[in-house]
């Protein structure tokens, strides 16, 4: 994690140095270069365009290392597998319906429920789409295309109904015979992304039915953002 931290700081410092160079060049050039105002404005315009290009080049690198660093911090203090006092394979859908979720798919392989919240603590102006998936077939991965297709259908339905949202909260439970290190690595591929004004939080949970044990990536002392904290609290509310 230290190497990631150093690279994150390195890219940030390089970017800040670039900003300082741009600003100082603008100020000094405007004050001390003996050119007409029209020529100076043309130079400023060209340099600004160059700076925007440099910024667009820097941004994904800074965001990438910041995200990776947050993930390592989250994983560094991850909580272990814990036992719960209910069988979510039989209680989950009823619990979701009590929380105003609508189940649109429930087969032998998976179920998917969702709710749209217009007035939401995560976003006061626009709503939030929250989806809960229960994977019953261990062969289905958290990134299975049929899950993506169903969520895309929900998005289209909400757009047709003119229901706008900026937040996605997706919680995925997967029933497994045994919670293994490989499955934990798979479940640890969570998301806490921000794309422009859109926030996406995805949490994956493993559920071992015979022992009623569950695992999901969370840390009692650190969270990458408030949206991830909210997603964890929603997940845990389904377990009580």
Image (cartoon, grey):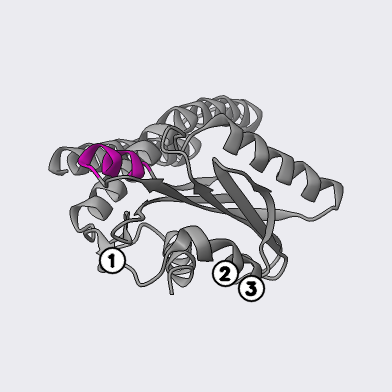
Q: Quadrant of the N terminus?
A: top left
Q: CA distance from mark 2 to mark 1?
A: 18 Å
- For the residues bearing labels 3 and 2, Cβ distance under 8 angstroms: yes
- Magenta stretch: give its range: 180-189
| Residue 7 lies in quadrant | top left
Quarter holding the C terminus is: bottom left
Image coords of residue 89 (percent x, y) = 48, 58
Q: CA distance from mark 3 to mark 2?
A: 5 Å
Q: Main secondary structure of the magenta part?
A: helix
Quarter of the image for residue 98 reads: bottom right
The residue at which mark 2 appears reads as: 95
Q: Is residue 173 above or below residue 68?
A: below
Q: Tell me if label 3 and label 1 are in contact, CB under 8 Å.
A: no
- Which label sits on residue 91? none
Give the label on residue 98, or none.
3
The tag on residue 83 is: 1
Q: Is residue 196 visible?
A: no
Q: Are marks 2 and 1 in contact (CB under 8 Å)?
A: no
The location of residue 161, given as percent across then percent down, is: 85, 52
Task: Please tell me whether mark 3 sits on a helix, a strand or a loop.
Answer: helix
Check disc 2 and report its element: helix, strand or loop: helix
Count of marks placed on residues: 3
145 vs 159, nearest the viewer: 145
Which comes sooner in the sequence, label 2 or label 1? 1
């Amino acid at each position: 994690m230290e190497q990631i931290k150093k690279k994150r700081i390195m890219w940030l410092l390089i970017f800040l140095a670039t900003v300082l160079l741009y600003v100082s060049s603008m100020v000094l050039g405007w004050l001390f270069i003996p050119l007409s105002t029209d020529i100076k404005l043309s130079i400023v315009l060209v340099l600004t365009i160059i700076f925007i290009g440099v910024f667009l080049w820097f941004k994904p690198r800074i965001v990438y290392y910041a995200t990776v660093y947050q993930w390592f911090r989250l994983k560094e203090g991850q909580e272990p597998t814990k036992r719960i006092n209910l069988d979510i394979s039989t209680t989950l859908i009823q619990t979701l319906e009590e929380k105003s979720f609508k189940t649109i798919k429930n087969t032998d392989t998976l179920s998917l429920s969702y709710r749209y919240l217009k007035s939401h603590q995560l976003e006061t102006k626009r709503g939030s789409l929250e989806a809960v998936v229960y994977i019953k077939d261990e062969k289905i991965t958290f990134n299975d295309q049929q899950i993506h297709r169903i969520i895309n259908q929900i998005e289209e339905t909400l757009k047709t109904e003119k229901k706008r949202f900026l937040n996605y909260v997706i919680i995925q439970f997967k029933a497994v015979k045994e919670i293994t290190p490989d499955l934990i690595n798979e479940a640890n591929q969570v998301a806490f992304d921000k794309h422009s004004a859109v926030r996406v939080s995805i949490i994956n949970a493993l559920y071992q039915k015979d022992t009623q044990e569950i695992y999901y990536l969370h840390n009692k002392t650190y969270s990458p953002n408030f949206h991830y904290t909210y997603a964890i609290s929603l997940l845990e509310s389904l377990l009580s």
